[in-house]
Image: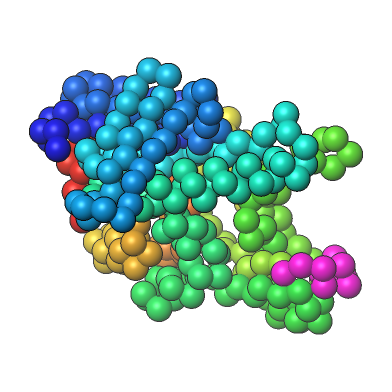
């Protein structure tokens, strides 16, 4: 195995990822080798090989891009950012479906099997933490304050929930890009009224949540054991609607809340994550959700907090918490 100083970091992400670029720049400053690739490059742009079932027990293998190479047993860390998988548009629908499955379970399986490197974060851990009902239940067990929430496809339950509270919002259970009549549609958190509840709700589960009478929002990024908290002032129900209306300031979380958020990540086996919180006029912090792989680059640019350096530090160490 190569010396620690020569062991590469794999950065798995799409071609245009400014956030990944920021981390790679920091790794370059530390002279840490980086092999960046996207699963969609499989074929001429990406080659992978791995062997199993013979000594030594650790799988031998390698990964090649058009410009870099890595021995899989030498990888010190994997930064799983925003990869995209190939859809093989040149093939027939059935062939494309087959090829996509072979790539996801072949390349994905080889990568998932890597146990030596630090994962930030392992995609299977990301996937588990991506279920909002699971997040809310676990947060409640850890003593975090969660707004009253109903997930249902029963219009009677939904109507009763909306009627029982002064203000209720609807949020998607997962952000999913789609188009309506050829126009991209973005789903924001929206306040919902009783007269909007009808039998259409039966089609799929919906998430309804009591609206927090907030004075500000807080985005918390955790990287390893480093915690970065940013207060977001907007006056908007969903601050993502208008980034030009936002102002930011860095601050320190209460120690008990910081400990609870770290325990939350530990419970999911994550080493990094972005939390969205709302603060009400009484100073109560309400947990809204966790994004296990959220964006943070614009927050570093706005506040000067050394977030990219924290990721580079963690990936360079290649150690679990």
318 vs 204, left or right, is left
Specify the farthest residue to the top: 67
Residue 228 position in % (x across, y down): 31, 45
| 53 vs 276, nearest the viewer | 53
The correct choice, above or below, for 201 with respect to 93 in the image is below
| 113 vs 83, nearest the viewer | 113
| 155 vs 14, nearest the viewer | 14
Residue 166 position in % (x across, y down): 69, 72
Q: Quadrant of the C terminus?
A: bottom left
Magenta-drawn stretch, dominant element (helix, strand or loop): helix
Start and end of the magenta stretch? 196-205
- Residue 30: say if magenta: no
- Residue drawn 44% across and 51% down? 109
| 173 vs 288, nearest the viewer | 173
Tally of numbered tags: 0
Q: Quadrant of the N terminus?
A: top left
Asked whether residue 276 is in view, the answer is: no
The correct choice, above or below, for 173 with respect to 235 in the image is below
- Residue drawn 52% across and 32% down? 42
Asked whether residue 268 is in view, the answer is: yes
Residue 50 lies in what quarter of the image? top left
- Residue drawn 39% across and 51% down? 112
Colour approach in the figure: rainbow
156 vs 173, left or right, is right
Residue 74 position in % (x across, y down): 22, 38
The correct choice, above or below, for 65 with respect to 12 in the image is above
């Amino acid at each position: 195995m190569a010396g620690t100083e020569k062991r590469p970091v794999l950065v798995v992400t799409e071609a245009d990822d400014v956030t990944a670029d920021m981390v790679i720049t920091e790794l370059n400053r530390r002279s840490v080798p980086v092999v960046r690739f996207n699963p969609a490059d499989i074929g001429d742009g990406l080659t992978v090989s791995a062997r199993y079932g013979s000594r030594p027990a650790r799988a031998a293998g390698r990964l090649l891009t058009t410009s870099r190479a890595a021995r899989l047993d030498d990888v010190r860390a994997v930064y799983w950012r925003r990869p995209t998988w190939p859809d093989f548009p040149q093939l027939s629908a059935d062939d494309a479906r087959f090829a996509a499955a072979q790539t996801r379970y072949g390349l994905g399986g080889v990568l998932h099997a890597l146990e030596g490197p630090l994962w930030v974060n392992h995609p299977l851990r990301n996937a588990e933490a991506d279920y909002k009902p699971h997040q809310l239940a676990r947060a409640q067990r850890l003593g975090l304050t969660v707004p009253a929430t109903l997930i249902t496809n029963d219009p009677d339950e939904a109507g009763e929930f909306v009627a029982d509270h002064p203000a209720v919002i609807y949020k998607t259970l997962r952000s999913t890009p789609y188009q309506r009549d050829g126009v991209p549609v973005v789903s924001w958190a929206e306040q919902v009224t009783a007269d909007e509840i009808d039998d259409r709700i039966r089609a799929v589960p919906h998430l309804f949540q009591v609206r927090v009478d907030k004075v500000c929002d807080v985005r918390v990024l955790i990287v390893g054991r480093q915690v970065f908290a940013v207060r977001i002032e907007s006056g908007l129900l969903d601050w993502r609607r208008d980034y030009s209306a936002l102002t930011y300031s860095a601050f320190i979380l209460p120690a008990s809340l910081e400990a609870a958020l770290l325990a939350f990540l530990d419970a999911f086996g994550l080493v990094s994550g972005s939390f969205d919180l709302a603060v009400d006029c009484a100073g109560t912090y309400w947990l809204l959700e966790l994004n296990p792989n959220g964006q943070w680059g614009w927050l570093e640019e706005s506040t000067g907090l050394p977030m990219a350096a924290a990721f580079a530090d963690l990936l360079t160490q290649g150690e679990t918490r």
